[in-house]
Image (spheres, rainbow, N blue to C red):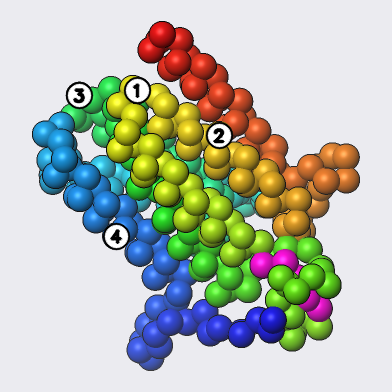
Amino acid sequence: MTYPNINPVALDLGFIQIYWYGVMYLLAFLTAYLLAIYRIKQTNEWNKQQIEDMIFYGAVGVILGGRIGYMLFYNFSVFLSNPLSVFSLQDGGMSFHGGFLGVWLSMLLFNRKYNKTFFTTMDFVVPLVPLGLGFGRLGNFINSELWGKVTTSPFGFYIQEQGIARYPSQLYEAFLEGLVLFVVLWVASNKVRAPMIISALFLVLYGVFRFMVEFIRVPDVQLGYLAFGWLTMGQLLSLPMVVLGVYLLLKANKVRA
C-alpha cells in the first residue's frame, strides 16, 4: 500500500488554518463527553454539570500534562537549556504518559470539588479515554509521524518521500489502544461494579498494547533505544502502568473475597 500523503491542514480559511491533529483532539473530547452523557442516564451518581466540569478538568490535564511530559521524558536536554520551550506548541510533541499523569492530577482536583473518591471517578473516566487515544493516533498517521520500522510486509505503507515501506504503527496503536481497549473497558464497566477493577484493566491493557507496538515502532530520534538494543522510552514508561494495574487487580479481588 502507498501512503496517501494527506494534507495535515483540514481547513485553510486564509487567516487561520485548522489542522487535522487539532480536529482529532476535539473529536476525542467530544466523544468522551457524549459517552459520559449517555452513561449518566443509567445512574444517579452523576449529573450533567459534573460531566462538563470533568471534561474541562481532563482536557486541561491532557494538554498540560502531555506537553510537560513530552519535554521531561523525551526532550529533557532541550527543556533544561530552555524551560520556556514547553510553551512552543507549534513545534509539536505530546506524551501519552504525561497526559495520563495530568488527567490523574486534574481528577484529584475534580474530586475535591465534588467530594468524590478517586476510583469512583477514575473507573467512570477510563472507558471514555480509548476512542480519544485512537483519534490521536489517526492524527499521527495523517501527519506522517511516529512511523514503524522498515518492512517488506504487505501490511506496510510505501512512503514516497522516503522511498521505503514502513509499518503503520500509528494505525496499530489506534486499533489496539483505541478500539480494542474501548470495547473491553466499555463492556466490563457495564458488568463490573467493584472499585479499582476498571482502572486496573486500563492500566494493564494499555501498558501491554503500547509495549507490544513499540517493538515495531521507530524510537524517537533524540533518544533512540535506552537499553538492550530494543527498550524504548514508551516501553519504560508503560511498565509501571502494568505493574500498578496488576497490583490493583489483585487488591480488588482480595477485597471482593
Above or below, 71 relative to 147: above
Residue 78 place in picture, x, y as percent: 67, 52
Please tell me which of labels 1 and 3 falls first in the chain: 3
Residue under pointer 4? 30
Q: Which mark is residue 195?
A: 1
Circle 4/circle 1 CB separation < 8 Å: no
Circle 3 sits in a helix, a strand or a loop, which is it? loop
Amino acid type, label 3 = Asn
Q: Nearer the viewer, mark 3 or mark 4?
A: 4
Q: Which of 142 and 226 is in front in this view?
A: 142
> Where is residue 27, by image quadrant?
bottom left
Residue under pointer 2? 204
Circle 2 sits in a helix, a strand or a loop, which is it? helix
Q: Distance between the residues labelled 3 and 4?
A: 25 Å
> Where is residue 104, by image quadrant?
top left
- Which class describes the residues within 10 Å of circle 4: few (<14), some (14-19), or many (20+)? some
Amino acid type, label 1 = Pro
Please tell me which of labels 1 and 2 falls first in the chain: 1
Q: Residue at x 23, y 25 (%)?
A: 116
Q: Which mark is residue 115?
A: 3
The magenta stretch is 164-168
Residue 65 shows up from this direction: no
